[in-house]
Image: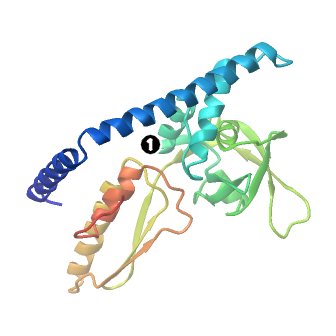
Amino acid sequence: MNLKKKQNIKLWLALLIAVVFCIIGSGFYRNLSADGAETYKGLKLFSDVIELVENNYVDPVDSKDLIEKAIQGMVHSLDPHSSLLAPDDFKELQIDTQGEFTGIGVSITMRKGFVTVISPIVGTPAYKSGIKAGDRIVEVDGKSTEDLRQAVKMIRGPKGTKVKVTVVRKGSKEPINFDLIRDTIPVESVKSLVLKPGYGYIRISNFNQSTTDDLKKALSKLESGAKTGDASLKGLVLDFRNNGGGLLNQAITVSDLFIEEGIILS
């Protein structure tokens, strides 16, 4: 989207907001006040429940932990993909989307209550050992995995250290144990190759900080290769199978490379 188009959109948006405020007038503020009162009542109820639990529950409780879990429940009720990230969890997420980390090399998610492998990263200990997409990781070093972030912390560790991962696999009667050595895992989200003259293939395995830039480089390489062979780039296969997700802004900018106009995300 060019600068002029963005400026026009901002101008129209400002005009639209002004018109809406003029039309709604004082009624808007009455509704806002009513909504605020309802919110206050809800917060008062929440505060009363916390106090009751603190004073009357059979065991001592951590108020901070209760509040974080209550917020997590509220956010989870919106949709399966929304969650509250505590500071430590946010640091882990940042590691996921940067250049490299130490671990076994799997993209995982929560699926039907189980920590599930989306895909092993090619060339990593997990990939070489035979861990497959769809495997459910039920234990790490003999300890059960209850949630995604806990599993990530258990799997990761210093390079060269051992970790035992137990998975349940569809079609296997017994759990399967994998004894692995942790290694440095490069987060390479874009890979490309020429299928045949004029036709390219690009695989995007996740969306990290460099995905869009790496994709641009891959496209330039494919296009220059096509020109060298006296042929234009006629076709392109974009492979997103088993993509582990990542940074939303990178997913948007990747889409923007191929979409000339219209809303990408709302």
Residue 37, compared with residue 106, is above or below; it is: above
Who's the residue at 46% across and 45% down the image? Answer: 97
Task: Check disc 1 and report its element: helix, strand or loop.
Answer: loop
Q: Could you tell me the amino acid type at mark 1?
A: Gln
Q: Position of residue 33 (x, y in %)?
A: 39, 32
In which quadrant of the rendered image does the C terminus lie?
bottom left
- List the single residue furthest toward the right: 173
* Front one among 37 and 159: 37
In which quadrant of the rendered image does the N terminus lie?
bottom left
Q: Position of residue 117 (x, y in %)?
A: 67, 57
Who's the residue at 91% across and 65% down the image? Answer: 173
Q: Which residue is mark 1?
A: 98
Residue 28 as seen in the image, left or right of residue 188? left
Residue 14 as seen in the image, left or right of residue 56? left
Residue 133, compared with residue 103, is above or below; it is: below
Q: Position of residue 147 (x, y in %)?
A: 70, 42
Who's the residue at 21% across and 79% down the image? Answer: 228
Q: Position of residue 211 (x, y in %)?
A: 37, 55
Who's the residue at 25% across and 74% down the image? Answer: 223
Q: Quadrant of residue 190?
A: bottom left
* Front one among 153 and 100: 153
Residue 69 as seen in the image, left or right of residue 56? left
